[in-house]
Amino acid sequence: MIFPSKHIEDAVGEFTKLPGIGKKTALRLVLHLLKQPLKDAEQFGSTIIKMRREIKFCRNCHNVADTDLCAICLNPARDHSLVCVVETLRDVIAIENTNQYNGIFHVLGGIISPIDGVGPVSRT
Ligand SMILES: [Zn+2]
């Protein structure tokens, strides 16, 4: 793919690093951003940077959090005696969106698979 600008080529390259985004989709997204007011593109970029820099992992359950503890662990209305062990954050989001679970979680952050060379890792 030939690009009229190195900046566009670089931006397309960054988008294609995302899962499920090929070069055509990346170019469509980049051209969309190019049409937006500068402040919207700046907001997009700064939101991603801020999320990446400031996201924390709950010291209790390893869910994502804005503080040392996640909103679920901080919620006194949750049943803290009920723990659902899940593989990833995606599982937390899926279960939370059912509005049927009132316990807390323990997020493994991946599964241990010795056959694939994935062993237990300490997060501390
Ligand atoms: Zn938590």
Image: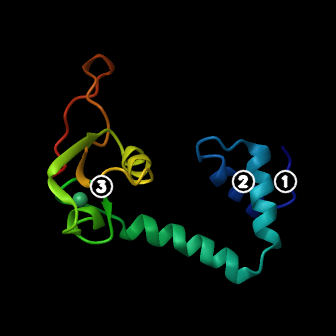
Question: Could you tell whether 35 is left or right of 117 in the image?
Answer: right
User: Label 3 belongs to which residue?
Assistant: 63
Q: Is 107 placed above or below 43 here? A: above
Which residue corresponds to the image point at 58% horizontal and 42% vertical from the top-left? 19
Circle 3: is it few (<14), some (14-19), or many (20+) Cα within 10 Å? Answer: many
Which residue corresponds to the image point at 64% horizontal and 41% vertical from the top-left? 20
Q: Quadrant of the N terminus?
A: top right
Observer-nearest of 55 and 90: 90
User: Label 1 belongs to which residue?
Assistant: 3
Which mark is first along the chain, 3 or 2?
A: 2
Circle 1: is it few (<14), some (14-19), or many (20+) Cα within 10 Å? Answer: few
Which residue corresponds to the image point at 75% horizontal and 55% vertical from the top-left? 9
Outermost residue to the bottom:
39
Please identify, in this view, whether the residue under mark 3 or under mark 1 is nearer the observer.
3
Query: In what quadrant does ligand 1 lie?
Result: bottom left
Q: CA distance from mark 2 to mark 1?
A: 9 Å
Q: Is 91 placed above or below 15 here? A: above
* Contact check, label 2 and label 1, Cβ < 8 Å: yes
Question: Could you tell whether 52 is left or right of 19 in the image?
Answer: left
Please identify, in this view, whether the residue under mark 2 or under mark 1 is nearer the observer.
2
Rendered location of residue 86, percent (x, y): 30, 40
User: Label 2 belongs to which residue?
Assistant: 12
Q: CA distance from mark 3 to mark 1?
A: 40 Å
Q: What is the three-letter code of the residue carrying label 3?
A: Asn
Question: Could you tell whether 33 is left or right of 57 in the image?
Answer: right
Observer-nearest of 111 and 102: 102
